[in-house]
Image (tube, rainbow, N blue to C red):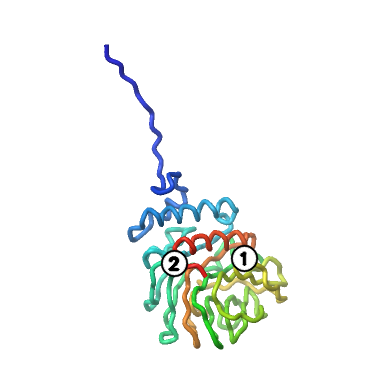
Amino acid sequence: RRLFYVQQFEAYECCPESGTSTDVDAQAYFDQLSDPMPDARRTLINSVFVDLKATGNFAELEELFFFANNTEDNGLIDLIVPTRTALNVNAMTFVADEGFYSSVLDPTQYIDAVFNIGTSTKFLQDDACVGTYLRLDISGLTDKNDYGSQHADFSRYTSLNAKSFGQCVGYLNTIIAGNHGAQANAQGFHVQRRSTAITHSYYKNGAHVSTIGGAAIPVPNYSFHVSGYNNAGVHVGGIANDQNYSVFFTGSSNIDIAALYTTIQTYMTAIGSQV
């Protein structure tokens, strides 16, 4: 007598090192990768997606670029909308696991996020959040916009200068500068948030630093440039320092900034590039 049996198997994608199922949005990002990504890095990225969803931040983000990646092309792919790819204009230097370096020797170099924030459904006039992770320890007096988008007549204006002659200065849908106090250097995770029509706030490494008054103006109708700013379609570069950009994001003011910092810092620590 012969016995036969059928065993049912359930197929699923998994991260090789963790043995856990791959998040569906992480898989969408992996499907868009231009270059191979090691299994260990895929596991880290998958954990980022899991954390973003557990904290509620994934739903609030409009775009999120991990420039600190294993290859340049992979770093330019948006984790939130993987079909969106940023542009490295005039060949900023890429360093694996650190991100893109700009140089005062060529102020025409920048990253174009290639998304018109004026059409955003999350980055709104009185409901906006934008930020970046900077690795370079800038010393001395410096002055350079780290990202921005504006109309030439200042009618629509958003930018950040993490260390403007010793101070952190930011604009977020306003023409009133937010002078957020002395900065020994520009290292860390910088976030600007506007959740009211009359104030905008600044956070560093997940902690609130200051809130500045200033009436809101409309969102610029141009994409963000990272390393300088987009002035009505024309790039304006830095003038006094080099910088390294590891992460850039935009989204709604409902982003849990402390939780987002923890998610990103955990990733940066895992790849040995934390500050």
The local secondary structure at tag 2 comes to loop
Percent from the top left, x then y, of residue 174? 65, 76
Residue type of the residue flagged with mark 2: Ala
Placement of 96 over or under 152, stated as above or below: above
* Quarter occupied by residue 125: bottom right
- Earlier residue among tags 1 and 2: 2
Instruction: Give 31 or 149, whichever is nearer the viewer.
Output: 31
Residue neighbourhood size for the residue with mark 1, other residues' Cα within 10 Å, grouped as few (<14), some (14–19), many (≥20): some
Percent from the top left, x then y, of residue 101? 43, 77
Residue neighbourhood size for the residue with mark 2, other residues' Cα within 10 Å, grouped as few (<14), some (14–19), many (≥20): many
What residue is rendered at 69% in x and 73% in y? 210
Q: Which residue is mark 2?
A: 68
Task: Determine if residue 161 is in view.
Answer: no
Residue type of the residue flagged with mark 1: Gly
What residue is rendered at 57% in x and 73% in y? 220
**Residue 258 relative to residue 6: left or right:** right
Placement of 150 over or under 79, stated as above or below: below
Q: CA distance from mark 1 to mark 2?
A: 19 Å
Task: Determine if residue 39 is in view.
Answer: yes
**Residue 19 relative to residue 220: left or right:** left
Can you tell which mark lies on residue 206? 1
Can you tell which mark lies on residue 224? none
Give yes or no for contact between labels 1 and 2 (Cβ–Cβ under 8 Å): no
What residue is rendered at 64% in x and 81% in y? 182
Placement of 10 over or under 92, stated as above or below: above
The local secondary structure at tag 1 comes to loop
* Quarter occupied by residue 34: bottom left
Percent from the top left, x then y, of residue 19? 43, 44
Q: Farthest residue in the top direction?
A: 1
Instruction: Give 269 or 245, whichever is nearer the viewer.
Output: 269
